[in-house]
Amino acid sequence: MTIGGELIGWQVEKTTRNTIDVLEKTCRAVSVSNVVGIVGPALLREAHLIAAFGEKTGIPVISYAATDPNLSNRNVYPTFYRTIPSDNAAASTLVKLFNRFKWTSCIIIYQNDAFGSNGAKTINEAFNSSGLIVRRMIEFDIDIFNIRGDLQRLLTKSATRIIVLWAESIYTSLIVQYALDQNLVGPYFTWILSSRISLNSFNEIYHQNLIEMLLIEPLIDSTASQSINTTLLNAAYRIWQQYEPKSFPGSMNINHYGLFAFDATWSLIQSLQQLCSSKTNSILCLLFVESSFCFDHRLVQLKLLLDTVSATEFLGVSSSIQFSVHITDQIKDSYYSIKNAQLSSNGLSFVPILEHSEPSYWRMPTEENVIIWPGNLLIKPTDQAMLKDVRLRIGVMESPPFTIVENVIDASGKNTTQLYGYVPDLIELLQKRLGFISDIQLETSN
């Protein structure tokens, strides 16, 4: 592909979760190449740094994965854009999901970095403003790979049974395995994940526990022909199959982050093409001020390029893309998919059960699937703690006719105490209905 008579190339760098390494690689690339824009990086802690680098150098940075609402401020990050919805949209969708299922509370487990803590904070604020309750926020330490506190006690002693897990896939798998080992995943707890994990990687003995899980993730809205550019998408697939056939997973298995990344790249290409198509800018559009210092090596027409990116609007392969000078988020509707872990011929996998267009409405996916709830049931669980199989110590006092105490000798000749009356009958009725185990203690009048 050529723009302004120049061949447009690219450079791919693999990040290592070390922000200094990311800055070093970015600075080196900008110093030795004529970089007109940056796509990525994937991790939030790296995105904050590269967004700040873009602000300092004036280079546009378009993210396909960073969802932190703090990155939405155009005044702080004037050269930052993103094609993926922010966590504000995800939190709003979660609120509407809870309202739909008539749940009122949850526990949030989050990884203790910018991605996890900012995501948990956003959900907490959305819940508070909507009359929902976050009963506890539990931290997963990504340095020691462990929960801060006794997870068994924190979950079982809570009044809620809905767990929202806000963590990257690598940590989500560890947390879920830890919870499975302590029997905290189904049938009494309903988990909602924010990151997709391979369910078949868990031992088959846990599959019945995992069936109840829900997953919320951004949706590529391909249900309507006007929602995505199918011509562009099919052309991209053909090129991929032609030049990298071994890596092409099939059109049905493309990760949605890949499509967000494509639209981020296409945004830069479209903007640069538009800039260079102007007669006024055609000669200078690809002229650079060269320097061995990365912060000084830049495109001469950088301000015009940024203005062009901000005014970009096109039908992409993930959705309709439109940026703004007021906010870093793309301003068209965002879509989310709610998926349910279910067994199939291919093992355990997430299947779509609901789709949501933020901020408008819910809809059923093209291929409708029933929701399988904990215990392999079709009945929606409550968000409140259940008493089934819980041992309750109940104190009663002799007070006829409510509680009548009678000492009797059983068949073995042993003297035992038996209780009769309204209170013991009520306890027995509640025990049958709620499933708890009663341990009745007779208290003396003293």
Image (spheres, rainbow, N blue to C red):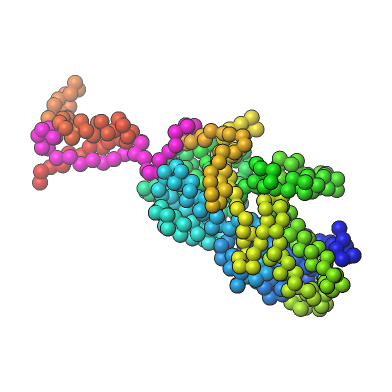
- Residue 146 drawn at (x, y percent): 52, 55
Do we see residue 319 in this rendering? yes
Tell me the magenta residue range: 375-404
* 92 horizontally vs 441: left or right: right
Up-down relation of residue 365 to residue 13 (above or below): above
Place residue 14 in its image quadrant. bottom right
Q: Most prominent secondary structure in the magenta stretch?
A: loop
Number of numbered markers = 0
Q: Provide residue 138's location: percent of width, then percent of height.
A: 46, 56
Residue at (62, 41) in percent of width and height: 201
Quadrant location of residue 224? top right
Please state which of residues 372 and 200 is positioned toward the viewer in this rendering: 372
- Work out whether 58 lies above or below 93: below
Position of residue 18 in the picture relative to residue 233 (left or right) = left
Q: Position of residue 11 (x, y in %)?
A: 80, 62
- Residue 211 in the image: above or below residue 301: above
Q: Name, please, the residue furthest toward the right.
A: 5
